[in-house]
């Protein structure tokens, strides 16, 4: 009985930690958080899980003061794309850093202040320049399905009325 699944960025983080014995679990936790943020951005669909994980580790190292300036080992011997100066890694790095900065600047949505100022916050949010992903494919499919159902209901009503 085989239990096969594709490698995830989280799995690569575990492997990368092996190559960085002096790095604490704080970096790992931060990198895993960044990976969670990346799942909400369609931008990352075009990137390999290893590239997302490598970029997340770089952002995490730069985001924790005690590790700032620490570089990941050059893992291009494992795979050519795992080089800290690769254009794909740098692009992922920049996007993850942007997403993290945006997440960090958001207020706690459960706080009383956030609830009281929700209409104002919504207007400000709409004006901010943020990372955007294309519309959800599933949402579009559901809307299309709902439209088809409505058309069928209208046809059935029309047929029923003509009898």
Image (spheres, rainbow, N blue to C red):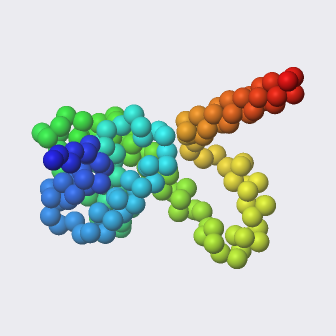
For the question of whether residue 58 can be seen, the reply is no
* Residue 74: quarter of image: top left
Residue 1 image offset from top left, x and y in percent: 15, 47
Above-or-below relation of 109 to 157: below
Nearest the eye: 46 or 140: 140
Residue 75 image offset from top left, x and y in percent: 17, 44
* Residue 84: quarter of image: top left
- Which residue of the protein is positioned furthest toward the front in this rendering? 163
For the question of whether residue 55 can be seen, the reply is yes
* Residue in the picture at 25% in, 53% down: 11
* Residue in the picture at 44% in, 49% down: 39
Relative to 65, 134 lies left or right: right
Above-or-below relation of 148 to 108: above
* Residue in the picture at 36% in, 41% down: 90
Residue 56 image offset from top left, x and y in percent: 34, 52
Which of the image's four quarters has the C terminus?
top right
Relative to 160, 20 lies left or right: left
Residue 7 image offset from top left, x and y in percent: 25, 45
Relative to 96, 132 lies left or right: right
* Residue 109: quarter of image: bottom right
* Residue in the picture at 26% in, 43% down: 6
- Which residue of the protein is positioned furthest toward the left in this rendering? 77
Relative to 162, 89 lies left or right: left
Above-or-below relation of 90 to 101: above
Nearest the eye: 86 or 43: 43
- Which residue of the protein is positioned furthest toward the bottom in this rendering? 112
């Amino acid at each position: 009985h085989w239990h096969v699944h594709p490698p995830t960025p989280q799995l690569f983080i575990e492997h990368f930690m092996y190559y960085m014995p002096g790095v604490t679990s704080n970096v790992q936790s931060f990198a895993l958080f960044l990976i969670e943020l990346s799942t909400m951005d369609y931008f990352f669909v075009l990137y390999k899980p290893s590239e997302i994980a490598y970029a997340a580790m770089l952002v995490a190292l730069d985001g924790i003061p005690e590790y700032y300036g620490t570089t990941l080992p050059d893992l291009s011997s494992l795979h050519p794309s795992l080089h800290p100066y690769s254009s794909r890694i740098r692009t992922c790095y920049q996007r993850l850093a942007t997403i993290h900065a945006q997440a960090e600047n958001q207020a706690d949505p459960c706080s009383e202040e956030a609830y009281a100022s929700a209409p104002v916050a919504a207007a400000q949010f709409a004006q901010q320049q943020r990372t955007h992903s294309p519309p959800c494919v599933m949402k579009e499919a559901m809307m299309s399905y709902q439209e088809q159902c409505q058309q069928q209901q209208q046809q059935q009503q029309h047929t029923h009325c003509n009898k």
